[in-house]
Amino acid sequence: MKNKQSYLVAFIMVTSLFFLWAFLHNINPILIPHLKKACTLTDTESAFIDSSVYLSYFLVALPAGWFMHKYGYKNGILVGLLLYCIGAFLFVPAASARSYNFFLVALFIMAGGATFLETIANPYITKLGDPEGAAKRLNLAQSFNGVGSVIPPLIGGQFILSGIEHSPQELSRMSAADLDAYLSFEANAIKMPYMVIGGVVALILILFALVKLPEIKEAPEEGGESSFSLRVFRHRHFRWALLAQFFYIGAQVGIGSFFIRYARYVQDIPEKQAAFLWGSIAMVGFMAGRFVGTFLMKYFKPAVLLCAFALTNVALLAIAIFASGNLAVYALIATPFFMSIMFPTIFALGIDGLGEESKIASSFIVMSIVGGAFFPILMGQVSDANSGNIQLSYLVPVVCFLVVFWFGLTQLKKAAVKVSVAH
């Protein structure tokens, strides 16, 4: 009973962390158009905001997994929270300097903290109970991650986006002093929100430092060798999960990051209204999809739902690309509902049956989300190469979802490696 109670407390506390990295990822659709204005960027240049975040994931995930393997789950969480806090506070001097590179560095550090948290929290959640319920448990935790998907666009749209959208021609007619004042005004709007974020994370860090979490001990491989090695790549379902996660995250990031640009291009929707639509409908749909997906997994295999949701998004994106007006915009808004289960489902299927090796596998799967660094840039290049036609760039996530569908097919009849886990 005591063990179950400690697991419940740990589950509740660690689930709260899911909000933090969700916030980091879902504020990017606000940061991209905002810094595009404040730092006068092209579509391709603005996509480096995503690249900074996901490149950090790629570079930090393996050290985070090694740290977790050597020093345990709790110490890894503390390091993650510290880095996240530092990165958030660095937004203040970055805004004062109005330096795009400084913003990217702050994002990189903040994302490094989120990488520690995500690398640790995902496998930790799967271990807090029966192995058979791992995918369901992770989807439940990720459901609260959905709260961190809804809030950033709404708060960011209100307190970061100014609603002032000058055309290039209007900017060119401004005097140097007026232009500098306008750009400084846009950059400075970001200071207070990130000071608040840094303060909140600092409080969470103190809470985790004071509370005792159960450290789950897992059985080592036969022979007593450490499983923190490249031998994990011998598992075929794990290798395929890496590929699927790479493409899925690329699709998820690209769809959200350029939505405000897309809404203006297709339907001439102002940035504040577009941010509200994304937060209040698309991200609420994403959160609802997590709960609905968790419920549906009582009746359908996770791989079956993954295939069905991937194909649905291919169809919705086809409408978003080739239709116009409200139909196109709302088709795109509907995609997050069907993206909702993809990350946790791919993750759980990828580490299924890996036992102690799930720690290193978790690091590699988190590294694979570096797809979020590449596909938005590819979308920006497609847009810039076609005179700013951001609608056409949504062909890129179509390809990504087809890869996710293929991964789901490979998992329908897979025989996962079974490794005994001692709690």
Image (cartoon, rainbow, N blue to C red):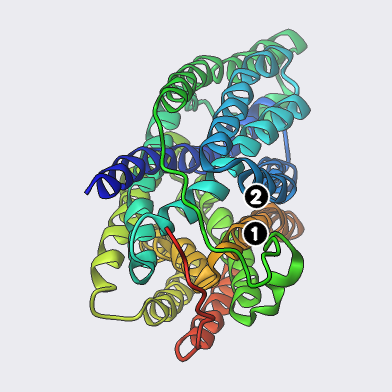
Q: Pinpoint residue 25: horizontal percent, then vertical percent.
A: 53, 43
Identified at 50% across, 41% down, the residue is 21
- Tell me the quarter of the picture where residue 102 sits: top right
Which percent across, then down, holds residue 162?
49, 23
Residue holding disc 1? 360
Identity, as a three-letter code, of the amino acid under mark 1: Ile
Separation of residues labelled 2 and 1 (CA atoms): 6 Å
* Residue shown at the point (70%, 59%) measured from the top left: 228
Which SS class for mark 1?
helix
Q: Nearer the viewer, residue 20 or 353?
A: 353
Element type where label 2 sits in the image: helix
Q: On the rendered image, what quadrant is the C terminus found in?
A: bottom left
Q: Could you tell me if residue 38 is visible in this image? A: yes
Q: Residue furthest bottom?
A: 413
Q: Which residue is depicted at the point 39% across and 80% down?
A: 308
Which disc is residue 65 wearing? 2
Image-based side of 381 in relation to 247, left or right: right
Of the numbered discs 2 and 1, the one sitting upstream in the chain is: 2
Using a 10 Å C-alpha cutoff, classify the residue at mark 2 as few (fewer than 14 neighbours), some (14 to 19) or many (20 or more): many
- Whether the residues at callouts 2 and 1 have beta carbons within 8 Å, the answer is yes
| Residue 99 locus on image (x, y percent) | 75, 22
Q: Residue at x 61, y 55 (%)?
A: 366
